[in-house]
Structures are given as C-alpha cells and as structure tokens.
C-alpha cells in the first residue's frame, strides 16, 4: 500500500488506490466474436472467464477503464445474506425457489474462494451480520424464514458495533476480498488466453441482423457478435426489457480510516435499512458507509462524507480518514437481480443488472447463470431472475412517477438518456439524473450510464 494516505483525492476508493492494470486498447475498425460482453466490471469479466472455459470466443468492451466503474467503489462483501431477503422470497416465490437462490449465492462464495487460490486478492472468510435498530420483529421473521430453509444462521442480541442494536442475524463463513486485485488477475489471465478487451469504447448503437447476430457500434469501430450481454450496470438499450421503469439507482457515501483506540471488527455489518450504516475491516482500516439516497437526490443536501466522519469520530476517538468515495447501486422493485434474456423473447441479447447492494455476489451468480443459458443449459434460478417476471406494482409506479415529473420539469441541462432534468450534485461536483442515474461532469462528459452521450457544449 502507498505509504502516505494523508492527502487522498476524494472519489478514489481504497481499491482503486492499491491495484492497477495496464491500459487496454480502444476499439478501432471491425472485430468479431461469438459473444460480446458490454461492461468490464466484475460481472462482465467473470462471465467472459466462464464462457472462455466453454470454448466461447468473447470480447469485453467498456466505456471507460476495466473495473473502474461500480466495481471500483464496492464495499467488496461476498455474501448470500442480502438484507432480510429470505422472508420476502418465501412469500413471493415459495420455499423451493428461495432455497435455490440461497444455494446459488453460497455457491458464488465458493467460486470466488477457488479463484483466490490462484489470484492473490486478500480473500478472507468471515461472518456477515445484518442488524436492525428499530424492527426486532423483522429480524425474528428472517430467522424463522432461514429455519425453514435449513440455513445455520444465528440470532444476535449484541455485536462488536459501537452502538446498540435491536436484534441481528449472522451468516457464518461469508467472505471479503480486494475486488480489483481479483478482477485484474482474471482479466490478465484471459488476455493471455486470447480474450480481447477494449477500453474507452462506448457502445452507442446496437442493431439486430435479419439473419441473426448483432452489430455493436462505438465511436471508433464496430463489433460483430452472434450474441450480446449487456453487463453495463444499468441497461442502456431501451427497445426491450423496460429496465428504466423496473429499476432506479442509489448512491452511497463511504470513508475508510482508522483510530489508534479502536479494535477492528471481525464480522462485516450492514443495517437492514437501506439508508443505514455498513461497516467492515479492509487492509487494516475500517470501511464505513451510509446515507444512501436516490441518485439525483443524494449529494444535494448536507456533506455526507463529513457526517460519516463525525459519526466515526464519535465512535472511535482519534479517527483519521484516509479515503472518501461513493458507490452507485441499481435497485430493483423486488430485491432480486435481472439475469437472463434481455426481453421476453430470447434473440441472443442477454442482461446482468440490478444487483441492488450485493454486486460482488450477484456478479458471480450472473456469470454462472448466463454461461449456462448461453451454452444451451438451464440454471435452477433462471425462472425467478428472468426479466419478464412479475414485480411489485408500487415501486414501478414510483419510478414512472419520478421519470414523468423530471421529464416535464422545464429546466436545463437535460439527460441524454430520456430527457430528464438533471440535478446538481454539489458534494461530488457533478450533474445527476434523478430518473435513471446517469451522471455528468460539469464540462458535460458522461461518467455514468445509462446515458451513452455527453451533454452538448
């Protein structure tokens, strides 16, 4: 690790500061493959690795640098415990489907562990704890749901946290790691095996051939592929799927630091309330995050980094912050990701999106599920995670209402995705879209999708 952490640039995560990879070329001219993966984050790179093992020729294209988007800002927890999820899954999908999802998430942890034997990435097994400050009954309901599934969770009255909780549920043998060390290691091995990576290659147009296959056009070239996977965090292709109605984006602020008077926690912790705190040890520092809010609303109020630092100093006298950054998550209406065919009809277009706040686990699950589907198999979770599944109506209505309000608002500048009025993010000095989460620098450069274009000068 770099010796001097005192003057870290805001917006650079612990992971980005302590791992790097040589730059990949920008697409120029025409390239071809069996499967084009759009998005070079954890989901896209792991999928390329799984497909390559099956003999499938892949290209991975990213609008920016590999791993420097959402993966570079994650809390890097790998866990099958995703809030108090399983009581909801049993209610909506039944015990059998809930059990399948739990099994797939546990399998994702084992897959990462197997990779970590070959790729040094600070992988460590440790418990994960979801706590509640005010809804003990909800924690007890989650325990009852897990008992139905036969999972050895543990109910906790007390924790290592520097504040009192009103109940918590612990999952044993979950994991944490350094996500960019893992990602760069996998990408490096794939490059040696002939997988092509193109950075700074934004796909701006997708066209379906009449006789099958896809044409993906960037600013400087074209990729011809039999099949395409959109793993670009928020799906940008609006002709199928209606993801702009089924998801919204949420922004969470994080700091990492230490105090000579604190003991680092053994477990990883997260509040069951989306706006609550998340904590874990990482490389001798405490990672503390919170103040989640809808993108376009976050950053418009108080300085969330200062609020986190104020809490940290109250918990741990002598606290010193080394890193400050923010993460962005795609939130779905039912708490489950979208993994599978992009729309209702399978035409060789696939999606991996909507991982909520569990992107590292979801990335490995998506890689395994899509590899099965693309190569002609069927995964036990395919039906539950398909894009055309029924989802709760109220979140859909809320997303639609927000979009309509911001589309009709008579102000500029406007997002190049669907024309919503942008809001100033004073904290991060950006312009953010409250409808679908696109973000722009003050000079108009698009730095976060689903928008594919910069703002006009």
Image (cartoon, helix red, strand yellow):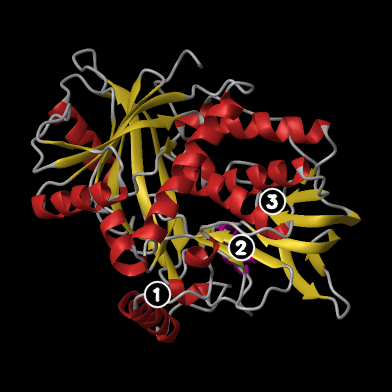
The magenta stretch is: 445-457
Task: Say the numbered circle drawn on residue 4.
Answer: none
Give the residue displayed 67% in from the left and 59% down from the top: 373
Q: Which residue is mark 3?
A: 62
Give the quadrant of the C terminus: bottom right
163 vs 451: above or below:
above
Q: Badges 2 and 1: C-beta atoms under 8 Å apart? A: no
Measure the alpha-carbon separation of dots 2 and 1: 17 Å
Residue 136 visible in this rendered orientation of the protein: yes
- Front residue of 199/139: it is 139
SS assignment at label 3: loop
Q: Position of residue 15 (x, y in %)?
A: 50, 31
- Front residue of 400/308: it is 400
Task: Say the numbered circle drawn on residue 391.
Answer: 1
Task: Say the numbered circle drawn on residue 351.
Answer: 2
Q: Nearer the viewer, mark 2 or mark 3?
A: 2
Q: Nearer the viewer, mark 1 or mark 3?
A: 1
Is residue 332 highlighted in magenta? no
- In screen coordinates, is 244 left or right of 166? right
């Amino acid at each position: 690790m770099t010796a001097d952490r005192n003057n870290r640039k805001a917006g650079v995560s612990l992971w980005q500061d302590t791992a790097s990879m040589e730059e990949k070329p920008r697409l120029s001219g025409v390239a071809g493959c069996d499967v084009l993966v759009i998005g070079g984050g954890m989901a896209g790179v792991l999928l390329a690795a799984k497909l390559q093992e099956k003999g499938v020729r892949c290209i991975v294209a990213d609008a920016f640098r590999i791993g420097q988007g959402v993966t570079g800002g994650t809390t890097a927890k790998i866990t099958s415990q995703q809030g108090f999820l399983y009581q909801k899954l049993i209610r909506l999908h039944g015990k059998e489907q809930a059990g399948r999802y739990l099994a797939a998430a546990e399998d994702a942890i084992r897959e990462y562990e197997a990779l970590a034997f070959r790729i040094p990435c600070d992988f460590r097994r440790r418990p994960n704890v979801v706590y509640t400050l005010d809804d003990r009954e909800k924690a007890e309901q989650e325990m009852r749901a897990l008992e139905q599934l036969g999972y050895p969770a543990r109910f906790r009255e007390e924790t290592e946290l520097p504040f009192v909780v009103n109940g918590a549920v612990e999952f044993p043998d979950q994991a944490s790691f350094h996500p960019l060390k893992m990602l760069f290691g996998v990408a490096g091995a794939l490059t040696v095996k002939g997988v092509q990576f193109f950075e700074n290659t934004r796909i701006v147009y997708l066209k379906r051939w009449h006789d099958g296959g896809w044409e993906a056009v960037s600013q400087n070239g074209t990729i011809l592929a039999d099949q395409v996977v959109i793993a670009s965090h928020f799906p940008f292709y609006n002709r199928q799927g209606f993801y702009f109605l089924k998801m919204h984006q949420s922004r969470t602020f994080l700091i990492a630091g230490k105090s000579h008077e604190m003991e680092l926690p053994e477990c990883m912790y997260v509040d069951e309330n989306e706006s609550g705190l998340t904590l874990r040890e990482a490389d001798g520092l405490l990672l503390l995050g919170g103040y989640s809010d809808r993108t376009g609303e976050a950053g418009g109020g108080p300085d969330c980094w200062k609020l986190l630092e104020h809490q940290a100093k109250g918990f741990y006298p002598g606290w010193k912050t080394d890193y400050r950054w923010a993460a962005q998550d795609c939130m779905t209406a039912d708490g489950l990701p979208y993994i599978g065919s992009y729309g209702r009809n399978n035409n060789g277009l696939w999606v991996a999106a909507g991982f909520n706040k569990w992107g590292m686990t979801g990335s490995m699950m998506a890689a395994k599920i899509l590899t099965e589907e693309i190569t002609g198999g069927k995964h036990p979770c395919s039906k539950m995670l398909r894009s055309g599944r029924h989802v709760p109506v109220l979140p859909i209505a809320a997303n639609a209402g927000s979009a309509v309000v911001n589309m009709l608002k008579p102000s500029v500048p406007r997002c190049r995705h669907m024309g919503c009025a942008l809001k100033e993010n004073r904290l991060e000095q950006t312009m953010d879209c409250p409808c679908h989460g696109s973000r722009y620098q003050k000079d108009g450069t698009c730095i976060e999708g689903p928008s594919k274009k910069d703002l006009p000068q």
